[in-house]
Image: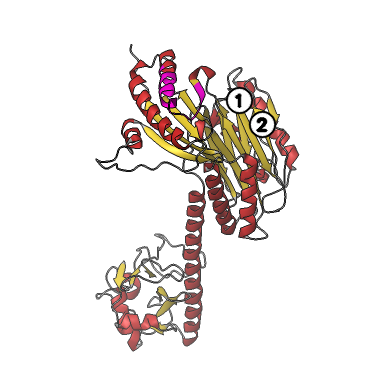
Amino acid sequence: YLRDPLPVGDERPVGPVVLRLRRTDRIPLDPDTESGRLPLLPSQPDLSPAVGGGPAAELCEVEAGGPLNEVLRGVRPVFGDSSAARAALPELLGEHTSVATGQRTVLAPLRGRRRVIGAAVFVRRPDRPPFEPDDLLVAAQLATHTALGVDKAVLYGREVYIADELQRTMLPDSLPQPTGVRLASRYLPAAETARVGGDWYDAIPLPGNRVALVVGDVMGHSMTSAAIMGQLRTTAQTLAGLDLPPQEVLHHLDEQAQRLGTDRMATCLYAVYDPVAHRIMVANAGHPPPVLLHRGGRAEVLRVPPGAPIGVGGVDFEAVELDAPAGATLLLYTDGLVESRMRDVWTGIEQLRERLTATARLTGPNPPPLEPLCDEVLDMLGPGDRDDDVALLAARFEGIAPSDVAYWFLDPKAQTAGQARRLARRALARWDLHDLTDAVELLVSEVVTNAVRYAERPVTLRLLRTDVLRCEVGDDVPQLPRLRQARPSDEGGRGLYLVNRMARRWGATRLSTGKVVWFELAMPPRSC
């Protein structure tokens, strides 16, 4: 009989303790009497043939201060004919159950490390010799080892649950799908016995439809490594929100790792893709280089300065800007994909490049589908290659055509709002979006007016036509606008209120050079 539910570790109950014991024995239907095992019980899975009563109880609620509770609080097993057991067994087995005569029943408490977790009933048939006093010692040993085994199993199950939850919450539930790029990802733990590790990946939308692609690897496969990974991932997300250059992001991650401890080492690769410029900027901190699969099927290992791992301190990181042509696929990965006891990292990278080339050859001039491509990449891992976690992030570049972008620099003066309205009207006419003209002119006028009020440098205005119409206004003032309810007597303060009511979405992002305020409008339905 085991406690239901079983206590976990040192957790303390939050309410009154009600000790319930649930029967857990499962007796085979046809015991093999010739195998040398003692046929303790016949075919029926209950105690009644052995103890001479009705069906055994499946659930027992232990009364506080009752005889069964007193036996369970004890340390030593007791014979069934003792006064303590005679009062406790009916409570455990049921009122209509009687034990065999003589010392043929032993009741033993099961005690874990700190508390009672159940009870064990040892029974011999009436035709068998009774237990002897030395059997109480055997019963005590069996009960002790059983209780400790159950206790450890519960703790292990709890540890596995915590590890799985920790790893699940540290990695993104789903990837964003910003305009101009499609994303897919995979994560594999090193093994079933090491479910947590320090590998992570992330995709973070940035202003201007850009996206930051991050993959990193903290040394180790413990929950400590996963916790450090979570802190570094959070730091990277915060730094990405400031729109810092990739090399600056790695520099601040390096400082954060040093604050976490002198032995907190990690590798990281941080890239920013701009779908308008069809360019990507990459910085590396000791991580394996990314691989770019071109539309024609050629796989290229990008030449990125390797840099020092995060946590070394006192080193500079360098960023390079590369072409990101439409139809190409960028793969970021951790060293568990390409390095193992069977091969070194550069051999694995070459195998990855060859696998990508062979996969792209199957689809001809069209790039291979992204999700099957990730599965194909993971298939290169052999049985002896799972020495480390594997994180994989794939980005298919689609870009935004120059004809879908309108961009202007505007001087911060009183006439700028009117100029912005005229420019927006012309762009919408060129795109045949006349239905949005009134709303865009009004919202652009309000946002540009707020920008030129305090700006000292030229204000930027950009319109992007994708699945939505997006407008971005940038200035050199770092303070973010705040939506507030204007009073009837106020002459201003209603601009953001109009944006909030009319736009599909809107927001503001602080940049290293100021800020960008943006809003989106749904595209009008196309006429048949």
Mark 2 Cα within 10 Å, few/some/many (few <14, many 20+)?
A: some
**Residue underneath mark 2:** 321
- Which colour style is shown? secondary structure
Where is residue 405 shown, x and y percent of the image?
50, 21
Q: In the image, what residue type sits under mark 1?
A: Ala
What percent of the width, then of the height, locates residue 126? 37, 78
Query: Bounds of the magenta span?
Result: 406-425
Residue 422 position in % (x across, y down): 41, 19
Is 103 displayed left or right of 487 in the figure? right
Magenta-drawn stretch contains 127: no
**Is the residue 275 above or below the residue 129 in the image?**
above
Determine contact: label 1, label 2, CB under 8 Å: no
Task: Tell me which label, 1 or 2, sits earlier in the chain.
Answer: 2
* Residue 315 left/right relative to 28: right
Image point 52% across, 67% down: which residue?
A: 36
Residue occupying the point 44% across, 19% down: 423
Report if residue 415 lies within the magenta region. Answer: yes
Whether residue 61 can be seen here? yes
Quarter of the image with the N terminus in it: bottom left
Q: Position of residue 89 (x, y in %)?
A: 32, 79
Identify the secondary structure beneath mark 2: strand
Image quadrant in which the C terminus is located: top left
List the single residue furthest toward the top.
Answer: 528
Mark 1 crowd level (few <14, some 14–19, many ≥20, 10 Å Cα): many
Q: Give the vertical position of 416 relative to 309 (above or below).
A: above
Q: CA distance from mark 1 to mark 2?
A: 16 Å
Q: Amino acid at mark 2?
A: Glu
Is 314 on the left or on the right of 205, as rendered? right
Q: What residue did someone put label 1 on?
A: 328
